Image: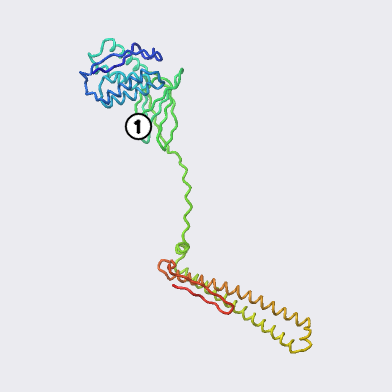
C-alpha cells in the first residue's frame, strides 16, 4: 500500500496562495506503528481537502490529519499535520510535528525533504513567542486572535484548560479571550517579540442570570386556607361571635315582625271604628284615611326590616355552625358529607342539614 505525503518545495510563507505541492510516495510496509483503515481514510480525506481551493481547506485538513494521528500515531502523518498547523499559525503544534517527522523519518527521508522540513522548523522556532495562560475555573477555552499589521486576523481555539496552558504563537499583536459557559472575562491584548514569554491569569466571573419570576401561588381551597390560617381555638371563638351576631339578627327580625303585626292590628282597629260610625262609613274623613295609610306603610316597613334581619341572622348562624364544625375537627376541614341549609318564613326560622 502506498500513502501520499506532502512536502513543500520552499518555505510556506513564500507560496501562500500559489498552491505549489509535491506529492511523494512513502511505503507503509515499514511503518513504525500499524496504520488502521480509519486513519488511512482520514489522512486521504485531509489530502483531498488540500487539493481544493476552498477557503477553509487548511482547517478541514487539520481536523482530518489530527484525527488520523490520534487513531494511529505514526510519524508519517506528522509531516502533513505540521504543514497545515503552520498555515493556521498553530506554531507550537507545527514545531512539535516537524520535530517528530524528522526524528521518526530518519534515513527514510530524502536529503531534499529533510533540508526543507529542517528549514521550516528553524523558521518557526525563531519566529514564535510563548504565552502561559491560567484560567479559573478550569474548563475554559482560550480564543487567540492574531492581529497582523497586514491581512486578516487569524483565529485559533485552545482548550479546554486544566491548569496552566502554554501557547507558542506567532510573534506580534494578539488578543486572547477565555470562554466558559455561564462565565465571562475581559479580553487580554499583548504584543510580544520573537523569543519572549509572558503570563496571564484569566479570572472568569459568573454571568448574571436574571432570576425567574416566581409563579403565582396556586389558590388553595377554602377549607385549606381556613385551616392553614386559623388554629382550632381561633375558629371556635369566631363561631361564637357568629352565633352571637346571628342571635341579634334573629332577635331584631322577631321584633320587627311583631311591630308589623301591631301596625296591622292598629289599622284594623281604626277601620273597625270607622265602620261602626255610619257617617264615617259613608264618607271616611281625611284623618281616618291618613291614619290607615300610615299604619299600612309602617307595617310594610317593619316586614321588610324583619326579613332583612332574619336573613342576616340566618347567615351568621350558618357561618357559626361551619366554624364550629371546623374547630371541632382534627385537621380543620369540613367533612365531605356536611351540608347545611337555612330556611326562613315570615313566622319561622330554622336550619336543616347533615353532619
- Residue at (42, 69) in percent of width and height: 329
Tag 1 residue = 161
The extreme top residue here reads: 112
Q: Position of residue 38 (x, y in %)?
A: 27, 26
Q: Position of residue 253 (x, y in %)?
A: 59, 77
Q: Position of residue 141 (x, y in %)?
A: 38, 31
Instruction: Name the foreground residue: 251 vs 262.
Output: 262
The image quadrant where one finds the C terminus is: bottom left
Examine the image and state in which quarter residue 128 appears. Answer: top left
From this view, report whether residue 185 is shown above or below residue 5.
below
Q: Position of residue 101 (x, y in %)?
A: 27, 18
Instruction: Name the foreground residue: 85 vs 137.
Output: 85
From this view, report whether residue 102 is shown above or below residue 289.
above
Q: Secondary structure at mark 1?
A: loop
Examine the image and state in which quarter residue 31 appears. Answer: top left
Examine the image and state in which quarter residue 292 appears. Answer: bottom right
The image quadrant where one finds the N terminus is: top left
Instruction: Name the foreground residue: 239 vs 2.
Output: 2
The extreme left residue here reads: 30
Residue 352 lies left or right of residue 310; in this view the side is: left
- Residue at (42, 27) in percent of width and height: 176
Amino acid at each position: 500500500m502506498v500513502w501520499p505525503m506532502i512536502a513543500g518545495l520552499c518555505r510556506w510563507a513564500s507560496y501562500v496562495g500559489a498552491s505549489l505541492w509535491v506529492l511523494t510516495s512513502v511505503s507503509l510496509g515499514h511503518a513504525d506503528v500499524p496504520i488502521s483503515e480509519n486513519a488511512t481514510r482520514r489522512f486521504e480525506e485531509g489530502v483531498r481537502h488540500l487539493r481544493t481551493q476552498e477557503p477553509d481547506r487548511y482547517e478541514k485538513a487539520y481536523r482530518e490529519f489530527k484525527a488520523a494521528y490520534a487513531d494511529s500515531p505514526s510519524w508519517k502523518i506528522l509531516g502533513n499535520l505540521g504543514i497545515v498547523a503552520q498555515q493556521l499559525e498553530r506554531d507550537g503544534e507545527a514545531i512539535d510535528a516537524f520535530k517528530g517527522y524528522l526524528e521518526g523519518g530518519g534515513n527514510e527521508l530524502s536529503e531534499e525533504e529533510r533540508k526543507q522540513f529542517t528549514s521550516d522548523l528553524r523558521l518557526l522556532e525563531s519566529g514564535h513567542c510563548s504565552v502561559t495562560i491560567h484560567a479559573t475555573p478550569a474548563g475554559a477555552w482560550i480564543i487567540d486572535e492574531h492581529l497582523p499589521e497586514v491581512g486578516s486576523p487569524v483565529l485559533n481555539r485552545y482548550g479546554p484548560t486544566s491548569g496552566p496552558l502554554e501557547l507558542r504563537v506567532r510573534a506580534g499583536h494578539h488578543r486572547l479571550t477565555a470562554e466558559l459557559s455561564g462565565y465571562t472575562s475581559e479580553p487580554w491584548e499583548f504584543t510580544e517579540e520573537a523569543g519572549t514569554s509572558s503570563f496571564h491569569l484569566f479570572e472568569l466571573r459568573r454571568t448574571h442570570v436574571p432570576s425567574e419570576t416566581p409563579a403565582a401561588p396556586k389558590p388553595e381551597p377554602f377549607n385549606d386556607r381556613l385551616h392553614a390560617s386559623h388554629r382550632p381555638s381561633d375558629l371556635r371563638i369566631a363561631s361564637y361571635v357568629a352565633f352571637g351576631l346571628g342571635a341579634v339578627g334573629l332577635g331584631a327580625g322577631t321584633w320587627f315582625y311583631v311591630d308589623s303585626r301591631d301596625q296591622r292590628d292598629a289599622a284594623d282597629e281604626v277601620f273597625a271604628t270607622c265602620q261602626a260610625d255610619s257617617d264615617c262609613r259613608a264618607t271616611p274623613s281625611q284623618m281616618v284615611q291618613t291614619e290607615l295609610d300610615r299604619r299600612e306603610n309602617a307595617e310594610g316597613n317593619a316586614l321588610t326590616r324583619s326579613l332583612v334581619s332574619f336573613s342576616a341572622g340566618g347567615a351568621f348562624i350558618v357561618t357559626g355552625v361551619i366554624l364550629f364544625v371546623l374547630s371541632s375537627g382534627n385537621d380543620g376541614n369540613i367533612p365531605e358529607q356536611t351540608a347545611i341549609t337555612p330556611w326562613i318564613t315570615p313566622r319561622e326560622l330554622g336550619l336543616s342539614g347533615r353532619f
